[in-house]
Amino acid sequence: MRRRTRQVRIGKVRIGGKAPVSIQSMSKTDTRDVVKTAQQINRLISLGCEVIRVAVKDRESASAISKIKRRISIPLEADIHFDYRLALLAQEAGADAIRLNPGNIYRKEQVKEVISAAKANKIPIRIGVNSGSLPASSLKSSPAKTMVKAVRDYLKIFEKQRFYDIMISLKASNVADTIEAYQEMARFCDYPFHLGVTATGTGSEGIIRSAIGIGTLLAEGIGDTIRVSLTGPPEDEVIAARQILQALGLRREGVRLISCPTCGRCQVDLVKIVKKVRNDVRCTKYDVRKRAKTIAIMGCEVNGPGEAREADIGIAFGRGSGILFKKGKVVKKIAAKDAARTLLNEIKR
Ligand code: SF4
């Protein structure tokens, strides 16, 4: 059961309510460089990114938004810190959503101005609190409680203005604090949540922390849109986000690869075959299409035939060759050296 939330729209993307959990990322280029930023965003779109956030650190970045938007096909959220006037400029430039940080834009009158503009422009605002940018004076309580209190105090300004097109995020670098903050906040409101663990680090460390934080909440039915934050290329964030949703059965898109870990029974170079298939399919249209395909590549007759038969396409290997299955039926015997190519052809077909 998913937490019941009200629905908001970032451009054409619905967040909350019964909308599917959407995938966000953030561009890592200098927003003022329109060409580079749009190129990066378009790569992310091809991988499945549905909403992009850009850093708006000055007036020039804000005015670049309109030019970037002309070159991309997904909604854009402007990430604003310190200077509320940038939130106004970003809206003038056509931003589809604004992210405000209660830790650094907190003067009531300023927040109210941003809200009035968002009301006029009919766009939502994300209240995005980060454990790293909370006022030092507020850190006496636990990080989760402090973040929740910061959001609840901030919400009062919005609700007094009768503004409800709100999304909320409460990101800590500590996974347990992040989970606790979202769980706690869920008790107080029905605004949709943007999930993420912040500053998770690089590579598998970052992916695991994100997957545990985001995945735990999603498994509890909490969360409406997700962003995996990694110290690395944003492409990896989008791929990881998709894999989290896929692992939880929340999105059944693209190629879902099942492969065994191999052991002493395996008599083919299974790792090479699996890597070849994964790498050749990743980032292609086959990997982001709406209808999912399960591909099983298994090392021997112990679990191989069972998994291969269950999959849309599968191979169960034996000594130097394998049996190809399609929709549960045996199709033919193939040599190990032809396996990757055969599977790729079948996926494309
Ligand atoms: S399917 Fe066969 S080769 Fe693969 S891990 Fe299981 S027993 Fe080992």
Image (cartoon, rainbow, N blue to C red):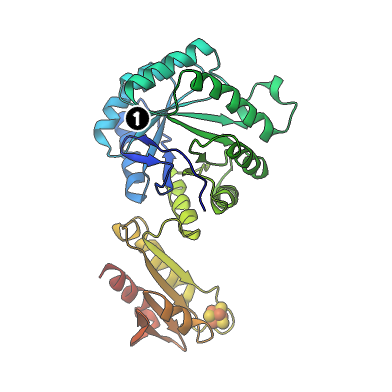
Q: Residue at x 47, y 75 (%)?
A: 270
Q: Is residue 189 left or right of residue 295?
A: right
**Above or below 252: residue 118:** above
Badge count? 1
Q: Position of residue 220 (x, y in %)?
A: 57, 51
SS class, disc 1: loop
Q: Residue at x 45, y 56 (%)?
A: 250
Q: Quadrant of the C terminus?
A: bottom left
Ligand 1 within 8 Å of disc 1? The answer is: no
Name the residue furthest top. Answer: 109
Q: Position of residue 53 (x, y in %)?
A: 41, 34
Q: Nearer the viewer, residue 62 or 74?
A: 74
Crowding at dot 1, Cα within 10 Å, few <14 / some 14-19 / many 20+, comes out as many
| Residue 149 occupies quadrant | top right
Question: Is any atom of residue 60 visible in this view?
Answer: no
| Residue 116 occupies quadrant | top left
**Above or below 64: residue 19:** below
Q: Position of residue 280 (x, y in %)?
A: 35, 63
Q: Amino acid at mark 1?
A: Asp
Q: Nearer the viewer, residue 129 or 44?
A: 129
Q: Which residue is mark 1?
A: 96
Q: Residue at x 34, y 74 (%)?
A: 343
Q: Quadrant of ligand 1?
A: bottom right
